[in-house]
Amino acid sequence: MSLSRRALMGGLGSGTSLSSAFVCARGREALVAEHLAEADEPLVVPPVAADEIRISSNENPLGPGPKALEALRGAFELGNRYPTNTSPSMADLRAILAESTGAQPANVVLGAGSGEILKNGVHAFTSPSRYLLTATPTYGQPARVARYLGAEVREVPIDSDGRLDLDAMAEAAQGAGLVFVCNPNNPTSTVHSGDAIAAFVAEVHRRSPDTAIHIDEAYHEYVTDPAYRSAVELALDTPNLFVSRTFSKAYGMAGMRIGYGVGHQDTIAKLRRYALTFNTNSLGQIAAHAAVQDPGFVSSERARNSEVKKMTVEFFERAGYGVMNSQTNFIFVDIRRPAAGFRDACREHGVRVGRDFPPLEKTHCRISIGTMAEMERATEVFGQVLEV
Ligand SMILES: Cc1ncc(COP(=O)(O)O)c(C=O)c1O
């Protein structure tokens, strides 16, 4: 059966999910707020704009939580103020992030998304004589910045399960300026346990005490593996170790550009040297301040993501395609064909999946987890494109 774009879009809103028109009319935030008030079940909402199913950038498809949106509405009039002069201010956001991570404000640096922390880490700790050690494939921004700055980049391949090869990375770290560890890793979605990360940090610093280590926890809120533990606590007591986090993923605020770094205050001071004075915008900062005080939103989003992910993974496994063990809001699927052709074919049917991730672009595709309605339609398209 050929699945046309019209048929694809016509199906939205059917079954148990809510219609796009309904969501538009009610207001997405009202719907989310009501849902959170009355149900433990994950929320199922179709996309508001039924144009294209966008599952390419690992965004939370539902947007910010109700408390963040409420704070945001009251924040517009403060748009004339620098983010230091609003209430809550940059200092207030740092303070609440410190409190929520068991740190002091001196242990926290804000960023325009966590991307700014990634960039500043490379500025602070690499140079033409101090290389960046990273994995492949992993989140590519640190390597791009290092190359731009003229620092050498050394890459350690992931293992056959799609996990960072921590033993090989520890061995290769001697003499590095900075080691970038993405945990969970993007694009492979896999995670290492808290114990494995602690042992890795100890081993790198035993071999190379001056080497800085950056643990990127952009997907921290989505992890369900009980062996996982954030490296924040370790970073507070360990010089040359820092963690980055973001409001762009589970908090649903990718467009608001708020991230932060946490670590020993001497390490954080080095990162702060490269930060713009006003790197956060007042609106995002005020929304983030409210979002931190709404932990129920994040756990509801984690549960929603897990349920939709389970359905999507089961689809691929039933069809005979391997999926790496995902601890994030995306999956990395062995589609046994080049990602480019698969991506183009899906796009023809209004589904946009992830870009190429060399060196696995000939076999694997990264697919973000949208709403249940989006993924039900997306899996129909995948089935058609893969002819299963
Ligand atoms: C692993 C990882 N780190 C950092 C980022 C940067 O995100 P942001 O700057 O929006 O916080 C991303 C974005 O996709 C990511 O996947």
Image (cartoon, rainbow, N blue to C red):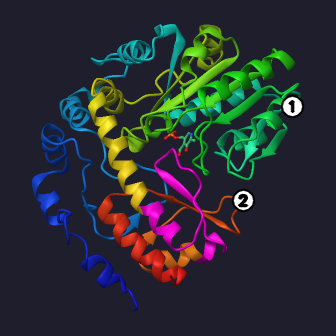
Q: Image quarter for residue 222?
A: top left
Query: Looking at the image, which residue is at 18% across and 30% down?
Result: 74
Dot label at residue 135 = none
Q: Is residue 294 left or right of residue 118?
A: left
1 or 2: tag closer to the N-terminus: 1
Could you tell me how far apart the alpha carbons at marks 1 and 2 are, in whole angstroms? 23 Å
Q: Residue 58 appears at what percent x and percent y? A: 47, 51
Q: Residue at point 10% right, 58% down?
A: 25
User: What residue is shown at x 15% (from left), y 48% (from top)?
Assistant: 31
Looking at the picture, how far across and down is residue 383, in whole percent? Answer: 47, 78
Vertical position of residue 102 compared to residue 284: above or below: above
| Identity of the residue drawn at 61% across and 70% down | 335
Element type at marker 2?
loop
Residue 18 falls in image quadrant: bottom left
Ligand 1 lies in which image quarter?
A: top right
Q: Which stretch is magenta?
A: 312-341
Residue, disc 1? 171
Residue 380 seen by the camera: yes
Tell whether label 2 touches label 1 (CB within 8 Å): no
The amino acid at mark 2 is: Pro
Q: Is residue 319 magenta?
A: yes
Q: Which residue bears the numbered disc 2?
A: 358
So how many labels did they put on this image? 2
| Residue extending farthest bottom | 1
